[in-house]
C-alpha cells in the first residue's frame, strides 16, 4: 500500500477555494480549518499503518488486515513519523485554538514516541507479550458495530495473516525478558478460546453457507496451530542472556516523558511521592490513635506508628465479602455511587451508557485484578465493561488474603476508581469529545489521575458518612498510587529487589502479601504505567486548587469537573494551559474540545 502520499496530503490540508468563487490559493498554516483538515487526513493515514489499533478505536475499515511485524513495516512506520512531524512543524502552534493546539502537541508526542520506541527502546526484540493479536479478534467478535456475518468475515480475513505474523515474531525476538515471556505464554493460552471455540460458536448463529463455514473453520485450525506453535517456541527457545526487565534510568525518563507528558520529570514525581507517603503516614497515625479505644479497648497502643496503623487496618480488613460474592458485591455498589453523585451535584452522569460488569477475559488477565474496557471513539455506541478478576480455583489462604485487601471499605473505593465517577464516567465524557485525536492518543496519566482524584473528591463530599474508618482505609488505598510511583521508579532505575519491594508494600503501604506479590509481578512486566496514578492525581489536584483560587466565590466543583473532562483524554499540563488561557473562538470544537 502506498501509505505516504505527502504531496496530496499537503495540497488537501493547505489549499481550498474561496467562498466568492475565485481561484484556489494556499491557506495560512495559522488557519484552524486547515489544521482540522490535515488532522482528518493524518488519522486516515495512521489507521492504514495501524489496523489493529484502528479496530480498538472503533474504526473498522481495516478489520480484515493484520500488519506483519517485520523490518520493512517498521521502516515504513519510521518514515511515516518523519513525514508527519515535518507536516506538523509547518503549523504555528501558538495561533491555533486551544483545542487544536492540544491536538497538535498530542500528535507530535505520539509520532516522537513511536519513533523512539522503534529506534531506541526496540521492545519488539525483547517483549514477546507485545505480539498478542487475540484482543483485536475478541473485539471484532464481541462488539455489535456491524451485523454478525460481516464481523465474522472480517475475523476470517484477518486470520489469514496469523501464521506469517507469529513466524515473524519468532524471528524478531532476541534474548527476551523472562518475565515477559511467561506473561506472553499465559495470555495466549488464556485467550486462545476466542479463536479456537468462540468463533465457531458465533458461526452457528448465522446463515453463512455450510461450505463457507467449513472454509472458515479450516482457517481457525491453521490459526490455532500458529498460536500454539508460538507458545511452544517461547517455552523452549534458547535464551542464554535474557534482557533484564528493568528499563534503566535513561530509558525510563524518556518513556516517562512520552507516556506521562507531565510538567515534572520522573525523578521529581518520585520525590513528590516520597513526601506524600510521609504525609499519609502522619494522618493515618492520627486516625488510628482516635479509633484504637473503639476496637482495642484498654489494650496498650503500639509505640511505633506504622505498627499502630497496621494493627488498625488488619482489624478493619476482616470485614469482607465471600469469594463467590466478589463480583455481585461490585454490581450492587454501582447504583449507590450514582445516587450519591446526583445528591451532591458533583457531576452530570449519562444514563444512556450502561456499564456491564463481567469476568475478566483471559487474554487480558495477569496484570491487574480489575479494569474498565471502553468502546473506541468511532464506536460510541459500544459496550463499556468492568472487568473483574475471578477467584475461582484459588486456595482459601490466597483468596482470604486478596479479600482482606479488597475489604468492604476498599471495595467501595475500587468501584469509585474503576467505574463511577472514575474511569467509566471519564471515558464516557471523553467519547463525547469532538476531537478524535484526544481519544485515540489519550493520556494514561490523566485517565488514571482522574480516577484517583475522584476517590478523594467523593470522600471529601461525605461518601462513607465521613466515618474515620473509611478515611483511614482510603489513605491506605491511596498509598497504593503513591507507592506505585515509588516502586516503579525504584525497580526500573535503582535495582530495587523483590524483597525490598514487598517490604515497602506490606510494611509501609499495609498491603496484603497476595497484593504485594501481584504488584511485583506487574512491575516486572510493565514500566512507567504504575507511576501514572500518582503523577496524574498530583497534577489534577494542583490544577483544581489553582482553579478554585482563581474562581473565588464563583467556584463550583461540578463546573470544574465538567470543564476539565470536556478536554477529553489530554495530558493535564495541556488542559491546565487551556483552562487558564484566553479562549480563541473555534467554530468546530469549542474551547473544551
Image (spheres, rainbow, N blue to C red):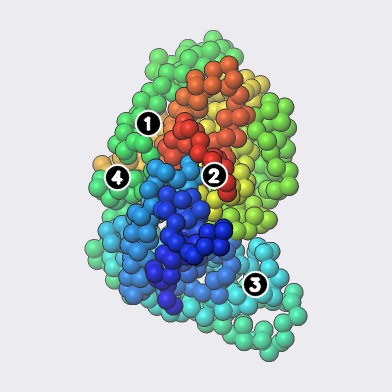
Q: CA distance from mark 2 to mark 3?
A: 38 Å
Which residue, given by chain and number where applicable, does mark 4 sit on? 253
Of badges 2 and 3, the one in the foreground is 2
Classify 487 as above or below 225: above
Number of other residues with Cα within 10 Å of mark 3, as a class: few under 14, some 14 to 19, many 20 or more:
many
Query: Can see residue 225?
Result: yes
- Residue under pointer 1: 273
Which image quarter holds the N terminus? bottom left
Given the current orientation, which residue lies at the most extreme top position?
Answer: 298
**Residue hosting label 2:** 586
User: Residue at left 67%, top 84%?
Assistant: 213
**Of the numbered discs in the image, which one, if any, rests on residue 151?**
3
Q: Earlier in the sequence, mark 1 or mark 4?
A: 4
Does dot 2 land on a helix, a strand or a loop? loop
* Depth check, front residue: 496 or 211: 211
How far apart, in angstroms, are the residues tagged by discs 1 and 4? 16 Å
Q: Is residue 166 above or below residue 573?
A: below
Which of the two discs, 1 and 2, sits closer to the camera?
Answer: 2
Query: What separation in Å lies between label 3 and label 1 (alpha carbons)?
Result: 46 Å
Structural crowding at the residue carrying mark 1, measured as other residues with C-alpha within 10 Å and reported as few (<14), some (14–19) or many (≥20): many
The residue tagged with tag 4: helix, strand or loop? helix
Foreground residue, 556 or 22?
Answer: 22
| Disc 4/disc 2 C-alpha distance (Å) | 35 Å
The quarter of the picture where residue 84 lies is bottom left
Residue at 56%, 79% in the rendered image: 157
Numbered disc 3: secondary structure:
helix
Q: Earlier in the sequence, mark 1 or mark 2?
A: 1
Residue at 59% across, 78% down: 156
**Residues tagged 3 and 4 counted as in contact (Cβ below 8 A):** no
Tag 1 or tag 3, which sits nearer the N-term?
A: 3
Amino acid at each position: 500500500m502506498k501509505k505516504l502520499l505527502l504531496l496530496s496530503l499537503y495540497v488537501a490540508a493547505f489549499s481550498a477555494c474561496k467562498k466568492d468563487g475565485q481561484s484556489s490559493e494556499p491557506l495560512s498554516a495559522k488557519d484552524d480549518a486547515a489544521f482540522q483538515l490535515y488532522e482528518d487526513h493524518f488519522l486516515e493515514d495512521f489507521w492504514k499503518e495501524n489496523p489493529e489499533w484502528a479496530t480498538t478505536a472503533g474504526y473498522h475499515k481495516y478489520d480484515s488486515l493484520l500488519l506483519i511485524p517485520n523490518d520493512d513495516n517498521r521502516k515504513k512506520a519510521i518514515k511515516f513519523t518523519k513525514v508527519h512531524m515535518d507536516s506538523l512543524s509547518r503549523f504555528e502552534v501558538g495561533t491555533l485554538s486551544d483545542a487544536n493546539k492540544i491536538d497538535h502537541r498530542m500528535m507530535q508526542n505520539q509520532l516522537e514516541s513511536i519513533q523512539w520506541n522503534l529506534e531506541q527502546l526496540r521492545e519488539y526484540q525483547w517483549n514477546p507479550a507485545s505480539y498478542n493479536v487475540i484482543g483485536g479478534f475478541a473485539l471484532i467478535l464481541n462488539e455489535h458495530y456491524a451485523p454478525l456475518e460481516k464481523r465474522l468475515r472480517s475475523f476470517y480475513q484477518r486470520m489469514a495473516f496469523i501464521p506469517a505474523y507469529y513466524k515473524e515474531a519468532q524471528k524478531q525476538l532476541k534474548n527476551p525478558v523472562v518475565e515477559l515471556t511467561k506473561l506472553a505464554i499465559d495470555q495466549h493460552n488464556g485467550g486462545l478460546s476466542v479463536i479456537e471455540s468462540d468463533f465457531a460458536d458465533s458461526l452457528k448463529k448465522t446463515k453463512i453457507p455450510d461450505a463457507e463455514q467449513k472454509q472458515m473453520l479450516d482457517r481457525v485450525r491453521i490459526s490455532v496451530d500458529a498460536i500454539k506453535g508460538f507458545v511452544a517456541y517461547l517455552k523452549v527457545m534458547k535464551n542464554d542472556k535474557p534482557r533484564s526487565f528493568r528499563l534503566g534510568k535513561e530509558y525510563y525518563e524518556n518513556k516517562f516523558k512520552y507516556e506521562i507528558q507531565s510538567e515534572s520529570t520522573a525523578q521529581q514525581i518520585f520525590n513528590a511521592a516520597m513526601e506524600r507517603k510521609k504525609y499519609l503516614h502522619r494522618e493515618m497515625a492520627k486516625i488510628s490513635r482516635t479509633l484504637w479505644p473503639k476496637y482495642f479497648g484498654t489494650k496498650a497502643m503500639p509505640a511505633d506508628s506504622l505498627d499502630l496503623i497496621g494493627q488498625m487496618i488488619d482489624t478493619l480488613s476482616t470485614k469482607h465479602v465471600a469469594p463467590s460474592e466478589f463480583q455481585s458485591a461490585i454490581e450492587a455498589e454501582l447504583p449507590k455511587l450514582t445516587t450519591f453523585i446526583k445528591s451532591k451535584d458533583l457531576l452530570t452522569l449519562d444514563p444512556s451508557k450502561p456499564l456491564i460488569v463481567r469476568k475478566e477475559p483471559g487474554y487480558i488477565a495477569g496484570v491487574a485484578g480489575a479494569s474498565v474496557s471502553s468502546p473506541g471513539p468511532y464506536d460510541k455506541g459500544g459496550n463499556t465493561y468492568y472487568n473483574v478478576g475471578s477467584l475461582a480455583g484459588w486456595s482459601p489462604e490466597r483468596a482470604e488474603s486478596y479479600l482482606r485487601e479488597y475489604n468492604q471499605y476498599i471495595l467501595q473505593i475500587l468501584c469509585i476508581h474503576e467505574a463511577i465517577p472514575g474511569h467509566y464516567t471519564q471515558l464516557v465524557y471523553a467519547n463525547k469529545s469532538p476531537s478524535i485525536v484526544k481519544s485515540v492518543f489519550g493520556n494514561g496519566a490523566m485517565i488514571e489521575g482522574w480516577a484517583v482524584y475522584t476517590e478523594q473528591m467523593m470522600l471529601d463530599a461525605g461518601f462513607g458518612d465521613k466515618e474515620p474508618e473509611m478515611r483511614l482505609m482510603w489513605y491506605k488505598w491511596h498509598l497504593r498510587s503513591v507507592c506505585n510511583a515509588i516502586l516503579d521508579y525504584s525497580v526500573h532505575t535503582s535495582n530495587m529487589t523483590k524483597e525490598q519491594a514487598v517490604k515497602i508494600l506490606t510494611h509501609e503501604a499495609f498491603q496484603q502479601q497476595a497484593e504485594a506479590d501481584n504488584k511485583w509481578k506487574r512491575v516486572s512486566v510493565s514500566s512507567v504505567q504504575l507511576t501514572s496514578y500518582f503523577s496524574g492525581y498530583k497534577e489534577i489536584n494542583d490544577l483544581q486548587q489553582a482553579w478554585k483560587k482563581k474562581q473565588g466565590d464563583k467556584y463550583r466543583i461540578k463546573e470544574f469537573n465538567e470543564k476539565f473532562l470536556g478536554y477529553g483524554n489530554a495530558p493535564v499540563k495541556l488542559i491546565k494551559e487551556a483552562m487558564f488561557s484566553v479562549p480563541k473562538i473555534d467554530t468546530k470544537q469549542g474551547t473544551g474540545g
